[in-house]
Image: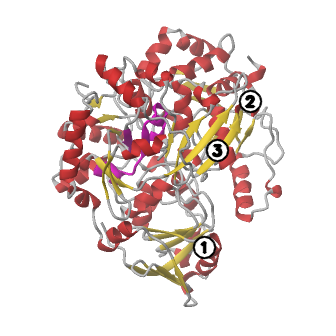
Amino acid sequence: MARTLFDKIWDAHVVERMEDGTCVLYIDRHLVHEVTSPQAFEGLRLAGRKVRRVDATIAVADHNVPTEDRSQGIAEPESRLQVDTLEENVAAFGVPYIPVTDTRQGIVHVIGPEQGISLPGMTIVCGDSHTSTHGALGALAFGIGTSEVEHVLATQTLLQKPAKNMLIRVDGTLPAGCVAKDIILAIIAKIGTAGGNGHVIEYAGEAIRALDMAGRMTICNMSIEAGARAGLVAPDETTFAYVKGRPYAPKGADFDRAVAYWKTLPSDEGAHYDKVVVLNAAEIIPQVSWGTSPEAVVPITGLVPDPAAEPNESRRAQMTQMLKYMDLAPGQKLAGTKIDVVFIGSCTNSRIEDLRAAAKVVEGRRVAETVRAMVVPGSGLVKQQAEKEGLDRIFREAGFEWREAGCSMCLGMNPDKLTPGQRCASTSNRNFEGRQGPGGRTHLLSPAMAAAAAVTGALTDVRELV
Amino acid sequence: MQKFTELTAIAAPLNIENVDTDKIIPARFLKTIKRSGLGVNLFSDMRYDSNGAEKPDFVLNQPQYRKAEILVAGENFGCGSSREHAPWALLDFGIRCVIAPSFADIFFNNCFKNGVLPVVLPKEICEQLMEDAKLGTNARLTVDLEKQIVLRPDGSQIPFQVEPFRKHCLLNGLDDIGLTMAHAPSIDSFETRRAQEESWRPSIHGV
């Protein structure tokens, strides 16, 4: 029977299938961070269990780490406790760990692919919903809760039923000024934040094939914002070229054997999808969110929608609340809306390709006087590469803060936060109320769009600057 | 895990769609290394003003809903992050059951690991239950997991679906790590076979 990419990866990892269809699913890689693991390790300890496969597990601290000078450690006591607890746990259980001061430290979803720890065809989990990022490699990667973190630590498996298959095909070619972030925001605007519930999304089509790995990671990353647990892109020559030579990727003859296997993974002709969505890339315009849900997105050329035009009562109430929180008026033009903060970073958009795209817009310009702008590279290695290319100089000279790697202002768990009422142009993934700090207002957009907002002091169509 | 068998309790109406995990428990409260104690921060930004005082119109601040153990909510409840702190916070507050037209996948899954029952019912029925819940302490709902029914205050019964394996675990309060451990021989042979047939698969060593 013709199978999808998802079906093939799933089948290859079923240890046992139970009567009701629940499977014992083998997990190839378990990424662990400080926020969702302490209770899991505590559970192991209480039950006298050990980590079954330390050689399939890797830990790093990213959510709580300060992105300024780290030589003095973490000042905030609760954040420090969480990172200290992780360090005690990895030492006690023998789990490989990348310390906060290591150059390879960074956001778990940046360093997995970067180190070659995440590979095509694998099952990859982490106690973090944006684990979907790793699906860009053609791996089945999804977020799990802490009980499941404990379950994987103890058994290297999960009890799961297969998801349904959804195909999102993006045909055609992206216009100049548009990038992967615009594709995924346009997809979420179209299918909604529950559009992918119960499904794994496979992204296909000419526009997806044309993306580099960083772009594919941006798309798969936000699958969770579309309600799907995972997103996938079939591995191809772009994938193999990316993986080759990475520290933990197979080498020499093993790499060739791996590629031969990975080439069998793409969906078969005629494979069944439960849902199919088609977009035309040529119609995409740079996107920006206006509300407090990732589906509340319009093109930068668009207007803030009017709740009065929404027939559904609870949706109308939600829109009204969103506009109140965001301090926007129905019918208002989004372009020209003044912003206070620009954040370029997060597991969605902090890779070298993202920083290059932003730097290209920033070069030769200055951050607007009313704006605080920051760049937070996704890993120490991304930072190092950017410095080698002189991107840090472009950002610093323009007035950006140039920081150490971490989750930073994507979520208010470390010192980088919005203050109440501040409006932020952000390359992150969630614009929920209070996500970047209580009372903070988030506009999601691409790195180039964020750079454009920084230099003009307002939401701006980046196509006018390049 | 705490068993879930039958629950008769006050239901609180939370008629909002897409209640995300940052609403249920904002990120700043995730710095704990424990599972307990999160109830006080449940729905923090909806429940308290910037000075930490209760907002009187928020449903769980109203006298008749302070002891609610059931929540009736809008579509796509629990969307957003994978944080299990969301069901931990609900449970710590005293909520044992959430009824909604749909749930986000990871949240739904996390509930079952913590003795919290998420019940999916059609939108029209949730709207009726929402009306029941608006009767406050006068209207209790009964959720019977064994029989898979919700009993309304007027005595009518609404059947709901639940996966048999999940039901079994909830009814008996089973820890599924223990259940999976029983499959250890299969896991061993899976690993052995792969190590032989796919020796190219790398391990993480020497980090």
Q: Are marks 1 and 3 on the same chain?
A: no
Query: Height in image: B128 above or below B153?
Result: above
Left/right placement of residue A344 relative to residue A319 reads: left
Pair 2/3: label in front: 2
Give the x, y percent position of residue B199.
Answer: 24, 29
Q: Residues within 10 Å of mark 3 (few under 14, many from 20)?
A: many
Residue visible at 33% across and 24% down in the picture: A257
Amino acid at dot 1: Cys
Left-right relation of B15 to B152: right
Q: Position of residue A6 (x, y in %)?
A: 46, 43
**Disc nearest the viewer among 1 and 2:** 2
| C-alpha gap between disc 1 and disc 2 | 41 Å
Q: Which mark is residue B126?
A: 1
Which quadrant: the C terminus of chain A?
A: top right
Q: Amino acid at mark 2?
A: Ala
Q: Secondary structure at mark 3?
A: helix
Residue that appears at 74% across and 55% down: A320
Q: Residue placed farthest to the bottom in the image? A: B155
Q: Amino acid at mark 3?
A: Ile
How busy is the neighbourhood of tag 2: few (under 14 within 10 Å), some, or many (20 plus)? some
Q: Which residue is mark 2?
A: A282
- Residue A388 belongs to magenta span: no
Residue at coordinates 28% horizontally, 60% vertically from top-left? B176
Q: Nearer the viewer, residue A156 or A451?
A: A156
Q: In this image, A323 relative to B48: left or right?
A: right
Q: Which residues are magenta?
A: A123-152
Q: Work out whether mark 2 precedes mark 3 in sequence or the reverse, and give the earlier one.
A: 3
